[in-house]
Amino acid sequence: MVDIDGTVTYSETVRVSSRCAGKEFVYPNPAKDRIYLSNATVGNRYTIYNTMGQRVITGFISNVLQEINIVGLTPGVYYIDMGEGEKWKFVKE
């Protein structure tokens, strides 16, 4: 920081935290043949829904970086629920 009198001072960085730490992510988005669930809770069920609310794929998370094959889905918008009460939107190309 530069004060009004021209002196320069620096603050010590004590802690930097990310709002994204520990959050689940779905990528790539848009996706072609597979998506990855990052930071997913092992043992939770995942469910993919189409825009009509129909369940199209379901399974269990076996790794914190879970790969899901979406080759059989038609192109469009989908929602995935990873069992944590939050749904993620992704696009299948």
Image (cartoon, rainbow, N blue to C red):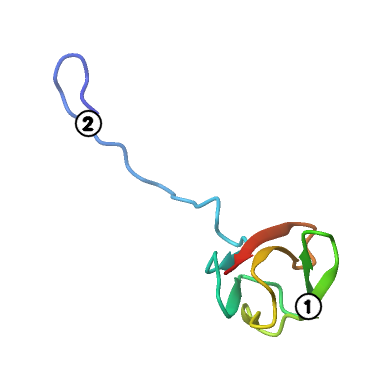
* Quarter of the image that includes the N terminus: top left
Q: Quadrant of residue 7?
A: top left
Q: Could you tell me residue 24's position as x and y percent?
A: 63, 64
Mark 1 = which residue?
57
Q: Amino acid at mark 1?
A: Ile
Observer-nearest of 14 and 22: 22
Residue located farthest toward the right when viewing the structure as drawn = 54
- Residue pictured at 59% horizontal, 79% vertical: 34
The image quadrant where one finds the C terminus is bottom right
Identify the mark nearer the N-term, 2 or 1. 2
Observer-nearest of 93 and 7 = 93
Residue type indicated by callout 2: Thr
Which mark, residue 88?
none
Q: Residues within 10 Å of mark 2 (few under 14, many from 20)?
A: few
Q: Quadrant of residue 90?
A: bottom right
Q: How many marks?
A: 2
Element under disc 1? strand
Residue 24 visible, this angle: no
Which residue sits at x=20%, y=25%?
A: 2
Please name the residue that numbered disc 2 is placed on: 9
Q: Residue furthest front?
A: 74
Instruction: State whether residue 47 is above or below residue 9.
Output: below
The percent coordinates of residue 57 (x first, y second) are: 78, 77
Gap in angstroms between the C-alphas marked 2 and 1: 56 Å
Q: Is residue 6 above or below residue 10?
A: above
- Look at the image and tell me whether residue 73 can be seen: yes
